[in-house]
Amino acid sequence: MIESVADFVSWVETSDAPEQITLRVAEGGSEMQSKVEALLKRLSADSKRMFQDSVLKMIMDSNTVCGQTDWPAVEKQIARKMQMGRALWGDRYADVLKTSHHNAKIQRFKTYLKQYAPIYVITLLLLVHVIHHW
């Protein structure tokens, strides 16, 4: 079990499975903040960006079923990261959160339309029919 920051960094440096590192960060919460900060200090700017994008993709993939991303779940998982998310994405954290929130709103609206639009259409057609025959 990797408990300390030093153990985590050592594990990262000797790991031959980068997807496991990404997965651990993607699934982690605020308890991962110091570990992520220590890891990011050792990465170049390009490597940081690639790591950030990989974590985001893994979060999205873990909330995707049959090609459909559950954006409210993605939004919730990103928001739950709080300080660790800020440490991971830095200045991009607000944009990542904003984008996931925007996509979640669109998905909720589409779901709402799928559920309730037929009722409104039928009601509107009945109303037009009644007015037309009045």
Image (tube, rainbow, N blue to C red):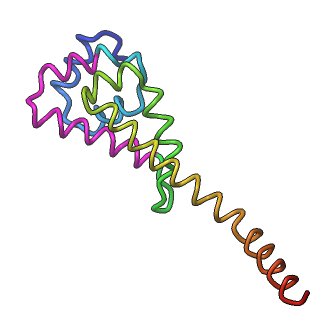
Residue 63: % across, % down: 48, 47
Screen quadrant of the C terminus: bottom right
Q: Residue at x 28, y 17 (%)?
A: 35
In the displayed structure, 60 sits above or below 35; it is below
Q: Is residue 22 left or right of residue 132?
A: left
**94 in magenta:** no
Residue 20 occupies which quadrant of the picture? top left
Q: Nearer the viewer, residue 106 or 64?
A: 106
Q: Nearer the viewer, residue 130 or 123?
A: 130
Q: Is residue 4 left or right of residue 65?
A: left
Q: Residue at x 77, y 75 (%)?
A: 124
In the displayed structure, 129 sits above or below 68; it is below
Q: How many marks?
A: 0
Screen quadrant of the N terminus: top left
Q: Magenta region: which residues?
A: 35-62
Q: Residue at x 18, y 23 (%)?
A: 40
